[in-house]
Image (tube, rainbow, N blue to C red):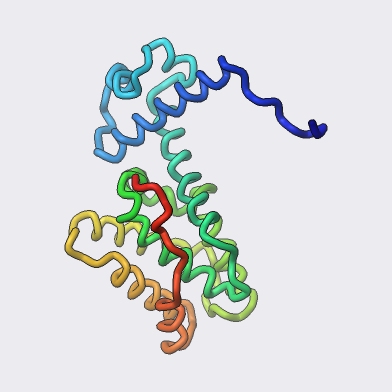
Amino acid sequence: MAADAKPEPNRLERRKMRTRAALVHAAQTFIADGNLNVPILEITKAADVGMGSFYNHFQTKDELFSAAVDAALEAHGAVLDSLGESSDDPAETFARSFRLTGRLHRKAPQLSRVLLRSGTELITSGRGLAPRAIRDLQAAIDSGRFTAQDPELAVVIAGGALLALGQLLLDRPDRDDATATDQIAEDLLRMFGLPPEEARSLSQAPLPSLDDLPAA
């Protein structure tokens, strides 16, 4: 075993991990449904664990809900990371991440609802899409691809658009998610300084497949 390798968790540790994961998943379900006032007892019932197990992992319901949102953000970031390496063109990388995230609203509806219920605070989160978007926007600005001056303000614009898009797709199941997402991506690229023809080309470029992702 390498010096920095972590030992495999023992049976007790694995059971604790499963219990925590069950509580987080149950909390995400309640958040997605907008039921934030649910008693802890109902959460433990949904997770199929005892009340005592809850307090082995979390001190309060708010702490659990915060962990549930963090887990959703990490899941979202992991999906983006799993769908291929960044392009040499930071504008293309930004466009691809935006377009994939828009499609995830339909592909992973529970994840989408958790993020939507968490609101605009996610735009400044240190997890999930926000730090990746700031990284890509800063690179596009530094390279001269985007004329926007402030990557944080650019994330506010893009993040607000993604949240509003998610709500629209939730409320309007008749809307085609790909068409709507790509149109907004094109508009954002133009707003950030790309010529119209290039903005349209990047917003219609082929994307990695989401078919292998598990439905949520």
* Residue depicted at x 57% and y 80%: 145
Image coords of residue 122 (percent x, y):
43, 49
Query: Which residue, as the protein is rendered here, is positioned at the far top?
Result: 52
Q: Is residue 128 left or right of residue 116?
A: right
Q: Nearer the viewer, residue 205 or 23?
A: 205
Q: Is residue 2 left or right of residue 203?
A: right
Taking the spot 46% from the left edge, 50% from the top edge, the residue there is 76
Classify residue 59 by image quadrant: top left
**Is residue 68 placed above or below 185 in the rendered structure?**
above
Quarter of the N terminus within the rendering:
top right
The x and y percentages for residue 163 are 34, 57
Which residue is farthest front? Answer: 212
Question: Count the marks: how many?
Answer: 0
Residue 15 % position (x, y): 51, 19
Residue shown at the point (44%, 77%) measured from the top left: 205
Please give left or right for residue 48 compared with residue 176 in the image: right
Residue depicted at x 45% and y 28%: 21
Which of 147 and 128 lies nearest the eye of the viewer?
128
Could you say which is closer to the camera, residue 34 or residue 84?
A: 84
User: What x and y, as percent, mark residue 94?
Assistant: 51, 68
Q: Which residue in the rendered view is the most extreme toward the right? A: 3
Rendered-image quadrant of the C terminus: top left
Q: Relative to 170, does residue 139 appear above or below in the rendering?
A: below
